[in-house]
Amino acid sequence: MIHENVLLGKVAVRMPGPNSILTYKIPPDSAFKLGDVVQVPLGKRKGQGIILEIGSYTDLCPPDLDFAKIKAIDGILDSELHLGPKELELFLWMAKYYHYSVGLLIFDCLPNPVKKARELKIVTGRSEGAPFDLRAEQAEIAQTLLPKIGQGFEKIFIHGVTGSGKTIVYFELIKKCLESGKSVLLLVPEINLTPQLTDFFCRNLGEFPFFVYHSAITNSAKYQIRKYLKNNTMPAMVLGVRSSVFLPLENLGLVVVDEEHDTSFKQSDRCPYNGRDVAIKKAQLHQCPIILGSATPSLENFYAFKQQNPTQYFKMLKRAQGAFPVVEFLDAKGLKWSDVTWPFTQNALTLIQEAVEKKEQVLVFINRLGFANFVQCSNCGHKWTDPNTGVNLRYFKKKNILSSAHSDYQIPMPELCPKSGNMDLFQSGFGTEKAQEVLSKHFPTYRIERFDREEITTFKKMKSRLDDFREHEIDILVGTQMLAKGHNFQRVNRVIVLGIDSQLNFPDFRAMERTYQLLSQVIGRAGRYSEHSQVLVQTYSTDNPLFDHIKSHAFDSFYKEELNIREMVQLPPFSKLAALFISARVRDRVISASLELKDYLANFPGLIVLGPAPVMIEKKAGQFTWEILLKAQEINSLHAALHAVANRELPTGVTVKIDVDPYFTS
């Protein structure tokens, strides 16, 4: 047959679902190759895709496909977005592991095509300072790890207390890698960590190209960075957040993931991948070492390295400077909301005053935004809720609005109750805005600012606020967990923590682990340059055993205790988890589809099915969602079930999202 001489291509099309890899003709005399980003006909419209395979009619044409119906690829969409073999392999692994459409995944991760990109300003490092004087712990680890550069793939963990100087160890390894002619990728969890690290590496790195990659840079800049890295083999360093793991560093020689435990590495929308785990796979494909570092490791990695691979586990028990703070857990049960200083105890205010009078600075940590958690009528009890989710609206005093945390819904602050006409509206709970107001009234001469998502809306504002704090233009900084990660503040010797009980009481098996990590990181901001520092944690649960580990600065006692509990109930790291989220616009349809799916999964061996149950916020964006949790001892048993679910036909109007290794299970 004449069509046996025609070349065909398998194209991963930008569309959801298991049937997103389609067959197209390769036009005669064309130069298409694997990894090309192309435009293709898709029904009556034009679609986008990536060529995964090119072959003959005999090799690639499915037996049930009429050759006459096979359409030809239209052309290259953008030659600069071409994917190399290792990039393709990484995306194919992700699509298989996370059970997600490979075409949709790739386009989610690539910058949009740019016709006229702005010129990219390339930053080059400098060598301003003398070589670092490493402490004994740092020197020992660096000398052990330096010979591993250029010797193939290895997973290494550095477990170092806050302020132990892990960054200096990273630096020694990064510098050697760059000098050997290989590039480096350093992943951090949050955009607000990049200015501090950028300054450090640019001042000390040497004359190598240095790129910062995060959500605040423009699509044009992302496109140009990708283009530069794709077309240059010179060694370069990339410092970026989760998405920078997809940059085409073809001569990659080292990957570092700092704060590996952080939940920000896990994407919640679209494909729920974990940037840390993808980085491990990337290092494996490039046959280079990967360093994972944290003061508070994820329980899974602590177990994997400390118990199962101890030769690749390195401890840093001492701070580079300063001393660990004295930590006090203060019973907050005597506080009354009617007190003018609420939610602060007098002890907290005294500590703050003492610190500022000594020309020190204070951090106040509250993991809640706004002025009040909700507003309620004092007469009839009416509360204002989000009609899209049913969740209470938070009060923001400066903007004078009630706003939802889970949708775009907001309304002006009411003057009276719509049911009773009562004008006495009660504000319950507190957040960063309330804390700032109370402190400003109590200390009118102090310079008090906030550091949260509601106040810091741009990268420029974030950098400016951090610069002001470091230059002592601010006395007290009130913030959310944006403050907890990696910051190095010279004058901070007092930290106040409010509202930690909401973290402790969160209905999730990782609640204790996350609270331990968060508290340890917040406490770690104090005393980095002083022998005398103090942290005050206000709580309603002073007898919680978790606080004993925090108070004594025990290095790994929490992990040993928590691992015993996890083993008893067979939760990670002693099993593998996946969550299935079933959604539809009609609640009854969600319930029936969830029950059908549970019955279907009961037939798979080696699988424990938990649920279905409604998620914590059952209705969001017009969709009702229920969850089924899958647990298995063998990873193959889990993925066999997930593969079947991903390829199963669903009732009309119902979708199922698969989340492998979920961080949150409620």
Image (cartoon, grey):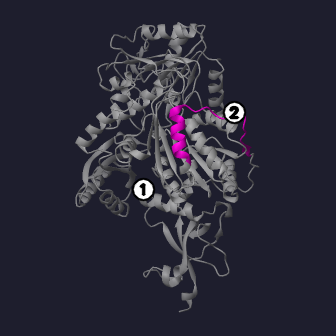
Q: Is residue 34 above or below residue 530?
A: below
> Where residue 386 is drawn, which disc sits there?
none
The residue positioned 55% from the left and 58% from the top of the image is 286
Which mark, residue 130? Answer: 2
In the displayed orientation, state which residue is furthest to the right. Answer: 119
Q: Is residue 563 left or right of residue 374?
A: left
Q: Which residue is mark 1?
A: 98
Q: Which contiguous range is marked in magenta?
A: 122-146
Secondary element at tag 2: loop
From this viewpoint, which residue is outermost toward the bottom?
1
Q: Position of residue 95 (x, y in %)?
A: 46, 59
Q: Is residue 144 magenta?
A: yes
User: What residue is rendered at 30% in x and 51% in y?
Assistant: 630
Instruction: Estimate the x, y position of residue 46 in percent, counting from the top left.
Output: 59, 66
Residue type, mark 1 in image: Tyr
Which marked residue is nearer to the observer: mark 1 or mark 2? 2
In front of the other: 60 or 409: 60
Q: Where the C terminus falls, by quadrant?
A: top left
Q: State whether residue 216 is above or below residue 153.
A: above
The residue positioned 61% from the left and 7% from the top of the image is 445
473 relative position to 428: left or right: right
Disc 1 crowd rating (10 Å Cα; few below 14, some 14-19, many 20+) is: many
